[in-house]
Image (cartoon, grey):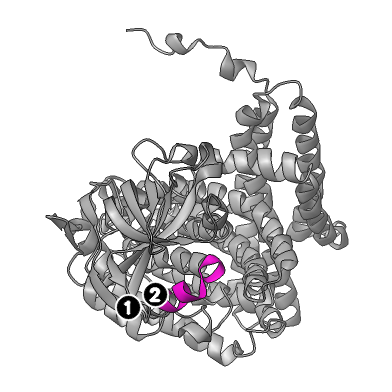
Amino acid sequence: MSQYKAPLRDMRFLMNEVLDYPAHYASLPNGKDADQETVDAILEGAAQLCEEVLAPLNHSGDQEGCHFNNGEVTTPKGFKEAYQAFVEGGWQGLSFPEEFGGQGLPMSFNIFKSEMMGTANWSFTMYPGLSVGCINTLMQYGSDEQKAQYIPKLVSGEWSGTMCLTEPQCGTDLAQVKTKAVPQADGSYKITGTKIFISAGEHDLTENIVHIVLARLPDAPEGTRGISLFVVPKFKVDAQGNKGERNTVTCGSIEHKMGIRASATAVLNFDEAEGFMVFEPNRGLEAMFTFMNTARLGTAVQGVCHAEAAFQGALPYAKDRRSMRALSGKKEPEAKADALIWHPDVRRMLLTQKAIAEGGRAMIYDALKTGDLMFNAVAAKDDKAYKKYDGQLGFYTPILKGFLTEMGLEAANLGVQVFGGHGYIKEHGMEQIVRDARISTLYEGTTGIQALDLLGRKVLLSSKGKCVRDFTLQMVKFAKPNLLKRGALGAMARALAARAAEWNVLTTAIMLRAPKDKEVVGAASYDYLMYSGFVMMGYYWAVQAAKAQELLDSGAGKESAEFYRSKIQTAEFYFERLLPRANAHRTGALAPTKSVMQLDNEHFAFA
């Protein structure tokens, strides 16, 4: 069983040397306390929590799972103590306003912390993670009374929160929501219905759970325009924020899942439970999805988490396990066989994991800077700035969520492959990473939904391709001064310049076909998303390689020369071995829709 080690060296390289987070934080009104000493202390404290408290519970929590008994859910051994340590450390309030008991730091800190926590123990991370969406929704759309009632104890971690959308008959298609909300004379509502797949919907870690629930008023119009949003606590809460009597919301069961078994996924039954409206009637989806971009960033992080975890498990095994001799001759003549890491195919798998984890981390960390600006615009009630930054982040999020979770799952599978048969058994923990990673491509919108969102909404409808033009202009600006350079950096720059043009041509080609072929967006979207992901990650690897070369040449880097050379060499691997996959996705995106749509539904199989 591998021991998790927080990748602080790589995190600091990105934050301090590649993306200049010190300057970013200095420009933010809530970044004045984010000096280097404070940032380092937070990263090191989070790393210690993850390495010493959360990681040791990952395997045992998976083996034990959660226990359900007559509506009550008990988390695995050690989880309550770990959660108490999380609360005592003030980790939930890291990026929330001081007026609610938080530390008021930029939003990006929450994701840095969540990445380490998620790699150490994704199941545990989901309990406090679901509270974040609940807090954000109440912060922007809750009344002053609701904020005072709920947010302080959610921020402290004393209480936790959920987001209750899915019902037995609908997941992605929320137009089918049936849960009812009947208004009462005192201003409350009686909420009746069943919600499923509610992560952290019932557990024993906190004394109260605050549910944010989608439901319909009696006179609501059909479809998504008739959905409202309500806050429904497990225990009723008085005006002073004190817990009262039990509400009529109960856990009917918990799901028996493939992975994340230590995270309770609940069926919740609302039986005329007392709730209060959040925001305005029939505008619930607007409020619910305000922070969907950041929620999807949180899921995109899971792709990085599982790639990192699989890499950290596979690398020491590849160094220690011996099998056969290297094709180029004995590498360890004193041993009976050479270590696995000498074999090219094993190196291919390890480098793929490393490239996914470190490339994905760079993509997310850069997007988080825009996320900080968006959150600050919300806090300042600057709707114009909020829409600007939300739009910018909106282009990134389907790529990050869709592409990185698919690649994280691939990296997890490669971890099993490096171990061979030993990866298939539970003792080494590699198969758990695969099982835990599998959900990431499904929740918060499947990869197919992310692809439709990217191509159909963000690229074609909302911007007519401008979002792609803007990002590829950024690629060209980077590539231009490096085009004539010799060596790896020049080759990367030329490849990026070509991909920038190709991405725009691909977008235009689909845009021109769409009015004539109504199925083209749906048929092309997956390949378009994956193409976009491979090209975007290529850009971020080139940026890392350029900075590494600059620091090598100047000698001004804080890391060793070997560290910087490894960045350049991993970037070379990415450009030569992984980026070419974009070619196949481009071909797929441009293929006629006929081959997808022509087969009769009844002819998919013959008994």
| SS state under label 2 | helix
Amino acid type at mark 1? Glu
Residue 332 seen in this snapshot: no
Q: Which residue is mark 2?
A: 154
Which quadrant holds the N terminus? bottom left
Range drawn in magenta: 139-150
Estimate how packed mark 2 is, as few (under 14), some (14 to 19) or many (20 or more) residues with alpha carbons within 10 Å.
many
Q: CA distance from mark 2 to mark 1?
A: 6 Å
Give the percent coordinates (x, y) of residue 302.
45, 58
Write the residue at 67% across / 42% down: 457
Q: Which residue is mark 1?
A: 158
Viewer-side residue, 536 vs 98: 98
Q: Is residue 230 left or right of residue 87?
A: right
Quadrant in the rendering for residue 586: top right
Q: Is residue 142 magenta-colored?
A: yes
| SS state under label 1 | loop
Amino acid type at mark 2? Leu
191 over 25 or under it: above or below: above
Q: Is residue 602 left or right of residue 587?
A: left
Give the percent coordinates (x, y) of residue 310.
40, 57
Q: Is residue 518 magenta-colored?
A: no
